[in-house]
Image (spheres, helix red, strand yellow):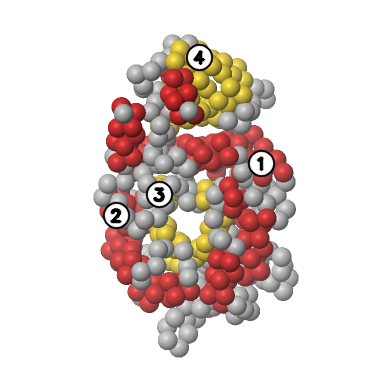
């Protein structure tokens, strides 16, 4: 009874005053084109990699056939550069007819036939970041159009909107128009990032009332340095960001670049673990047609995904920093259950032997004996006292990702 009561408190204490469209109860998962394919519109010279309906259909096929859909990846998201250069005679957006001959409605039908969902992109202002028509003067019309097409997620950017102060009005307007369509459309906002960049105070209560997920910081690039800079930002801002995350509303540190050009396997494990600790959307931006097995296995790791998708939706935070070692911990739904990432951000050319007492994991529970699972190594450790040191070897630019269970409650949970 006591465990059930605490569980209800945990689930009920997050997401208050939040956007209530029934979506993103856990961090959304899927695939997004931008980081990997950018604004490649030259389908004559590069038909395999250009922004076209063929690209999105092929990625949908891979999500289904290679196990991603079964693992929880369900959104196929178009980013910038899908539009024709002008609106039509009725001021409606429409897709470039050469690259999207079936139109967005036809593409949505294909995506839905696979049991997946379609995401699309627009921007607040007159133009998108790449200079295509945006929604600033047509928010209501575009919301209706996206709903008619069968869109399931909308990302609204804003880099061409020079007066960032107006975003506090424009993004809530789009929320209103999306909700009025009657179609559930997950709303991904870039609003806080632009206010941050302009030095405008961010009202996260207002953001959470209007957005399901929101970008806080700069775009991720295909490098380990970019991943680290995002992690560092989240550490510095965690006291602001942790309280606003919860079911229906999540901070978005940007895309997973696992399987692209730059991350080693160890770095890819680290990004996957940290995005799970941060309760971040898991939106891959890679080429699922050519990704190699070791990276695919990281993205499909069911135990990492289970932590990411924990029902309480609590964002983790950094609880210890000692040289190149950082400890990040996230509360999970079941009483006394935690996930901890021990991150080695150093580049010293040999693994570091780490010895950390469980008291430094940021764990607070009335039950002091833990069982520990190493999520990537699939290795179990039993009956660790809170004052006992945990020993592990961590390679450079890598992570030890641990799932901690109070020993008695693990037995209860599995019974």
Q: N-terminal of the two: label 1 or label 2? A: 2
**Which of label 1 and label 3 is nearer to you?**
3
Q: Please identify, in this view, whether the residue under mark 2 or under mark 4 is nearer the observer.
A: 4
Q: Report the residue at 55% width, 66% height from top.
A: 112
Disc 2 crowd rating (10 Å Cα; few below 14, some 14-19, many 20+) is: some
Q: In the drawing, what numbered circle is on residue 383?
A: 4
Q: Which residue is mark 1?
A: 297
Q: Which residue is nearer to you in this view: 91 or 13?
A: 13
Marking on residue 64: none
Quadrant of residue 234 in the image? top left
> Quick one: SS at disc 3?
loop
Q: Which residue is mark 2?
A: 209
Q: Residue furthest bottom?
A: 89
Residue 83: where, in percent of width, then height?
53, 74
Does the rendering let one see residue 54?
Answer: yes
Helix, strand or loop under label 2: helix
**Is label 2 in contact with label 4 (beta carbons under 8 Å)?**
no
Image location of residue 117, percent across then percent down:
52, 62
Between disc 2 and disc 3, the foreground one is 3
User: Residue 383 placed where, x, y %?
Assistant: 50, 14
Residue beneath the point at 37% across and 50% down: 248
Tell me: 266 left or right of 240.
right
Which callout, 2 or 4, points at the residue further toward the start of the chain? 2
Kindly report which numbered mark, 1 or 4, lies closer to the viewer in this rendering.
Answer: 4
The residue to which callout 3 is attached is 25
């Amino acid at each position: 009874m006591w465990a059930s009561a605490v569980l209800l408190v945990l689930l009920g204490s997050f997401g208050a005053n939040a956007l209530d469209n029934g979506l993103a109860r856990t961090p959304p998962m899927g695939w997004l084109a931008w980081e990997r394919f950018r604004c490649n519109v030259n389908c004559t010279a590069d038909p395999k990699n250009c922004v076209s309906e063929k690209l999105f259909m092929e990625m949908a096929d891979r999500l289904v056939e290679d196990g991603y859909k079964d693992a929880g990846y369900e959104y196929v998201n178009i980013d910038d550069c899908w539009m024709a250069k002008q609106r039509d005679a009725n001021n409606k957006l429409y897709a470039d007819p050469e690259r999207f001959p079936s139109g967005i409605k036809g593409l949505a039908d294909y995506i839905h036939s696979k049991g997946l969902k379609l995401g699309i992109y627009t921007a607040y202002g007159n133009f998108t970041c790449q200079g295509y028509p945006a929604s600033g003067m047509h928010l209501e019309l575009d919301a209706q159009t996206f709903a008619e097409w069968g869109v399931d997620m909308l990302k609204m950017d804003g880099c061409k909107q020079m007066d960032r102060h107006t975003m506090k009005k424009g993004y809530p307007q789009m929320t209103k128009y999306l909700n009025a369509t009657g179609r559930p459309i997950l709303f991904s906002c870039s609003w806080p990032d632009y206010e941050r960049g302009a030095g405008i105070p961010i009202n996260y209560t207002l953001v959470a009332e209007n957005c399901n997920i929101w970008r806080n910081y700069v775009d991720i690039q295909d490098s380990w340095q970019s991943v680290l800079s995002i992690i560092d930002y989240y550490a510095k801002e965690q006291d602001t960001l942790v309280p606003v995350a919860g079911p229906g509303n999540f901070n978005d540190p940007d895309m997973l670049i696992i399987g692209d050009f730059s991350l080693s396997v160890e770095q890819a494990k680290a990004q996957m673990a940290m995005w799970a600790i941060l309760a971040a959307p898991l939106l891959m931006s890679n080429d699922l047609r050519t990704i190699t097995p070791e990276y695919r296995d990281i993205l499909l790791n069911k135990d990492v995904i289970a932590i990411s998708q924990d029902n309480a939706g609590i964002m983790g935070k950094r609880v210890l920093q000692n040289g190149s070692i950082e400890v990040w911990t996230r509360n999970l739904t079941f009483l006394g259950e935690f996930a901890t990432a021990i991150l080695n951000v150093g580049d010293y050319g040999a693994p570091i032997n780490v010895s950390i007492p469980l008291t430094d994991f940021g764990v607070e529970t009335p039950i002091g004996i833990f069982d520990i699972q190493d999520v990537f190594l699939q290795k179990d450790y039993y009956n660790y006292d809170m004052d006992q040191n945990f020993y592990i070897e961590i390679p450079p630019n890598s992570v030890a990702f641990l799932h901690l269970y109070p020993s008695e409650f693990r037995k209860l949970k599995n019974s």
